[in-house]
Image (cartoon, rainbow, N blue to C red):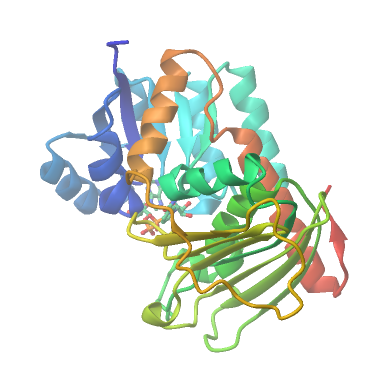
Amino acid sequence: MERKVKWGVIGSGGIARRRTIPEGIIKAEHAKLEVIYDINSEINNSVAKEIQVVPAGSILDLLKSDIDAVYIASPANIHLDQVIACAESKKHILCEKPLGMTVKEAEEMIRICSGNEVILGVGLMMRFLSQHQSALKLILEGKLGKPVYARAQLSCWYPPIEGAWRQDPETGGGGSLMDMGSHCIDLLEMFFGKIKSVSCFINNIIHSYRSEDSAVVSMLFENGAIGTVDTYFCIPDNSSKNILELYGSKGSILAKGTIGQGSEGEMTAFLESDDSGYNAQQERNAGEGMKIAPKPVNTYMAEIEEFSNAILQNREPTNNSALGLRSQKILAACYMSARTGKVVEIE
Ligand SMILES: NC(=O)c1ccc[n+]([C@@H]2O[C@H](COP(=O)([O-])OP(=O)(O)OC[C@H]3O[C@@H](n4cnc5c(N)ncnc54)[C@H](O)[C@@H]3O)[C@@H](O)[C@H]2O)c1
């Protein structure tokens, strides 16, 4: 396969500039960056200069250029309109999470993309981390036994900032849960399968903006396992180690820092052999466990490479729109639970 997918970017000044362009689109073997657009032309011009690519003056200009696919990395409340514009111009779309603001918006995106015969993917790139893939393999091979409990944590310090779109549900769809909890929930579904129901608390413990700065979700998986996601905008960065814990009847997989944007986290598996019986003394194996340290993968490069290959091979990408819709459905159930104080079944 020699052809490269020609990419455009909408919303070049945020995560696109920090990660997805330099680590993903520029580095991926089957991708080539052609044109970028940001509503802030000063930023757009400076990113364009930085990476030696053409700046577009409008979305229309970007869509008129000879590109195959667009990476949308604008605030969540603009995703729907931009996905529609790209789909109607017959461009394939990798849209950042969340897929719009609501279940309805995600469904609308899927309908429009399907009607225009373009592929829609979602930027839930943490699935690609090589340690997460190794953990998934161990679980699928039955090494963890029957799944029992999963926890995923992603928190940071995010103080009030004038005009910050994540701090207002009108523009972000929600706060820490929508923004970071969405990655955690998606990862736990990848590891343990479908979530059946959720119970959720959200709060503003420290910051006074309109979006929640704190959220905890308890979830029951269809296979009977139980899980939690905890995600805060009000814990200092260095205090949150972004823990991932996966427990089963035959062992555990414990990780620190694998959830996030980099690939420097650590993961260890503590697995029992098949014949281990009940130990009345409850002696703990003092062993260090088995380090899970496969060759690191840059998640931004992996998501762009996978999506580019999906286009070239005319197939669904791994991070397809169904995942984006699923994420919106679970998030909607979480917010409903937080509002009503009830356990909510996933639609
Ligand atoms: N997967 C990840 O690792 C990851 C990390 C951060 C953000 N995100 C997602 O990426 C998206 C953007 O987040 P961010 O942190 O980069 O936000 P940001 O605010 O840092 O950057 C967004 C950029 O979009 C531009 N923009 C705003 N309105 C626009 C419009 N109408 N048209 C074109 N450009 C516009 C802004 O000027 C800014 O440069 C969100 O959906 C967010 O959830 C994903």
Q: Is residue 207 visible?
A: yes
Depth check, front residue: 19 or 112: 19
Depth check, front residue: 77 or 157: 157
Specify whether 211 is left or right of 261: right
**Quarter of the image containing the N terminus?**
top left
Depth check, front residue: 177 or 131: 131
Depth check, front residue: 113 or 243: 243
Q: Is residue 127 visible?
A: no
Residue drawn at the location 34% of the way across and 53% of the way down: 15
Specify whether 38 is left or right of 224: left
Residue drawn at the location 23% of the way across and 47% of the way down: 44
Residue 68 percent across, percent down from the top left: 38, 20
Residue 96 percent across, percent down from the top left: 48, 45
Residue 327 percent across, percent down from the top left: 65, 49
In the figure, 214 relative to 70: above or below?
Answer: below
Residue drawn at the location 56% of the way across and 41% of the way down: 137
Residue drawn at the location 45% of the way across and 60% of the way down: 267
In the figure, 106 relative to 345: above or below?
Answer: above
Residue 249 percent across, percent down from the top left: 73, 58
How many tags in the picture? 0
Specify whether 132 is left or right of 147: left
Specify whether 84 is left or right of 33: right
| Residue 130 lies in quadrant | top left
| Residue 55 lies in quadrant | top left
In the figure, 53 relative to 209: above or below?
Answer: above
